[in-house]
Amino acid sequence: MTLLDVVLAGLLVLAVWWIPGVVLGRAVGLRWLDLVVAGPVLSLGFFTVLGVWSGMLGMPWDILSVSLSLVGVSALVFGARMVWGRRRRQRAPVPPKVSLPLPRGRAALYVAAGIAVGAVVGTWTWWQATQGLTLLNQDWDIPWHANMVRLIADTREWSTGLAGNFAYYDTVIEDAPIRNYPIAFHAVVALVWPLSSLGVPEFLGVFQLFVIALQVPLSAAVMTWYLSRRAGAAAIAAVAATALSSFPYDLLFRGPLIPLVIGLALLGPFLVVVLRAAQKRSLTLGVVGGIGAVGLFGAHASIGVVAAVVLLIWVVLASPWTWSGVRSRFLGLLPVGLVAVVLGGPLVLEMLRESGRVSEIQWPAYQTVPQAFGEVLLFSHGSGMAQWFWAVLVLLGSWALLRRRQLWWYLVVYIVAVGLAAFTAGSDGELITRLTAFVYNDAWRLVGVATLLAVPVVGIGGQWALDQVRARVTARPRIANGALSVVGVLLLVLVLQGDAQRNVSSMQRGYRAGETVTHGEREMMEALSAVVPADGQVLNDVCDGSAWMFALSNRMPMMRHFEVIPTLRQELLLEHFNDFDDDPEVRRAAAELGITHVYVGTGLIRQYLDQPSGLEDLDDVEALRLVAGNSDARIYEIDWASVGDGQQMLDQARENQVHRDGVPGIWESKDPDALADRNAVCV
C-alpha cells in the first residue's frame, strides 16, 4: 500500500459520497452551494432507495448499473420539474427558490478555516492511531463490516437478507437469530472498493478517515450556523467536532460502530434540510429530506429514531410556542415523512423483523447515575479524563441558549440526550431499558449521540465568550481584537495538541498489534486463497480472529462471526473434529459442511476464552496434512481419500449445498440443521 493508493481510494470515496447527490440535487433544483451540505445526505438516500427497490426488482448492484440508474432517475426528475414548473408559471408567478441558510463572504471564510482546522486534527488523529492505516481493529464488529462489503461486491446484490445467508447458512435462515442487517453503508463502499488497489480493511480505513476529517467538521459547522448564524460559533464547532473523544473516536475504536458513525455524521445536514423545508414549506427540500431520511435509516435504524426525537421536540417547543405554531411545524414536516414512507417502506418492514432481537440485548449499568452525568457533561466518558476547555464552552453555550427563547428547543434536545445517556450508563431500570432499546441499551452509543449534539452548544458557547470579552474592550478595539485572536489561537493549539494525543491513545485501544488477529495470523489467512478451492470451506474457531477470513482471502470459514450460534453439526466439529480418523459422524458432519481445510490461530477476541477441544492436537490426525504455518497460525488440508469412502461422502454431500457464483463456500444448505442449545460461540 502506497500513499498514491490511499489518495486514489480517497478520491473514490469523495466521488461516491458527493457526485450522486450533486447530480440528483441539480435535477431537483438545488443550488450548487446547497449541494455542499445536502449532497452527501442525498447521495446516501439515493443509494438506499435505489438499493431497496433494485433488490426487489433483481437489478445488479454494481457501479455501472447504479451509474446508469442515477442518470436515468436524474433525467426523469429534471424533466418532471421542467414540466411542473412550466405549468405553474402559466397559472401564477413562481415564488423564488428556497435555499439553505449558509454563510457567505467573510463569514464563509471563517467557517471554512474552522472546517480546515478540524480536518487537519481529524486526519492527524486517525493516521497516527492506525499507523498509516496499517493496524487492524481488534474488536467485535469490524470483521462483520469488512465481510459485508466483500459479500455485496461479490454477489452484486442489495439485500438486508444477505446477513442471514452469511451467518446462518447451515440452518433455516428465516428462523435464525440474525436475518436482516442494515447495509446501506456497506453497499456504498462495495460499489467503489473493487475499483481501488486496497484491501477491504484499508479501504474501510480510508472511508472512516474521510468522514472524520471532512464530513464531521462540515456537519458541525452547518448545524451550528443554522442555529446561531454566527461564523465564530460555526468555526469553533467544526474544530470541536474532531477534538472531542466520545464522538466519533470512542465509537470507532469500540466495535467499531461504523454505520452508526456514518449516519450520525450526516444528522446535522439532514436536520438543516428538513427544518428549512418545514419552515419555508419547500416541496423541493421536503423531497430531499425524505430521501435523506431513508438513507439515515438505511445506515442504521437507530439514527432514524434520534432524528425523529429531535424533530418532535422541535415541533413542540420551537418558537412560536402556540397551538397554531405546533400545527404549522407538523404540517411542514408531512412531505418529508410521506416521501420517506413511500420510498423506504419496504426497508422499514424488513428491519422491523430484527426489532425483537435488538430489544432483547441489554448492557448492564457500570457506574452511578451522578457519575454518568458528570462524565457526559465533562466529556470524560470512557477515559475518566475531562476535556475541560470544551466542557466550559458547553456550560457557556447552554447559558447562551437559555437566553434565546427561539433556541430553547435545541437546549431541550441536548438535555434529553444527556439524560438518556447518563441513566443508561447508571441504571438497569425497566423504563430506561425500554426507552433505549433502539440502541441495544448501549450507553456508549448514547454518549456519542449526546456529544454530537453538544458540538453546536460548544460553538455557541465559544462565540458568547468572545462577544463578552469584546464588549468589555472599548479602547483601541483593533489592537484588542488582534491580541485576543492571538491568545485564542495559542490556547486552541494547546488544547488541540492534548486532545489529539488523547484521541490517538483512545483509538489505539481498538487499533493495535493483534490480540485478536496477529500479523502472523493475517499472513496465514491471506494465504488461504492459494490453497483452498473456492467451493471448499475452512473449519475454524471464529474466536481466534478467523472471522476476518472472507474479507482478507476471499475464502469462506465454517463459523463466520463471533456471535453466531452454531448448528449441531458445527458444534460437533468444534468439540470432536480431532476424532476425524475414527468417528464416522464427525466425517459426515465435515462432509455436509464442505470442509476441505482447517485453520487454527493463536489470537482470541476475548482472552478468557479457550480453544475448542476438537481443534486441539491436530498434528495427531492422520487425515490432515499441514500445508502452511507460522508461529501464530496453521493451515491443514483434509485428505478425504485416506478415510475409506471419504471422497464419495464429500461429493454426495455437495448435492445438498447451494453455491452462488462469485461467492466461495456454501451459500445455503438444502438440509438445514438445528441450532445448538447454547450461547454464541464467543460469548
Image (spheres, grey):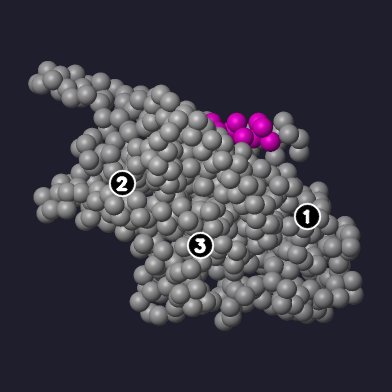
Residue 85 position (above or below residue 252): above
**Secondary element at image label 3:** helix
Mark seen at residue 378: 3
Residue 257 falls left or right of residue 44? right
Mark seen at residue 6: none
| Closer to us: 120 or 133 | 120
Residue 570 position (above or below residue 340): below
Where residue 10 sits, quadrant-wise, is top right
Mark 1 to mark 3 CA distance (whole Å): 39 Å
Residue at 42% of width from left, 49% of height from top? Answer: 461
Quadrant occupied by the C terminus = bottom right
Quadrant occupied by the N terminus = top right
For marks 2 and 3, the one nearer the N-term is 2
Q: Are marks 2 and 3 in contact (CB under 8 Å)?
A: no
Q: Residues within 10 Å of mark 2 (few under 14, many from 20)?
A: many
SS majority, magenta: helix
The residue that label 2 is drawn on is 340
**Measured from the top left, where is residue 465 in percent x and y?**
43, 47
| Closer to us: 180 or 35 | 35
Q: Nearer the viewer, mark 1 or mark 3?
A: 3
Residue type at numbered disc 1: Arg
Residue 460 position (above or below residue 426): above
**Measured from the top left, where is residue 169 in percent x and y?**
57, 63
Q: Which residues are magenta?
A: 6-16
Mark 1 to mark 2 CA distance (whole Å): 42 Å
Mark 2 to mark 3 CA distance (whole Å): 37 Å
Residue at 21% of width from left, 56% of height from top? Answer: 316
**Measured from the top left, where is residue 18 in percent x and y?**
48, 32
Mark seen at residue 522: 1
Residue type at numbered disc 2: Ala
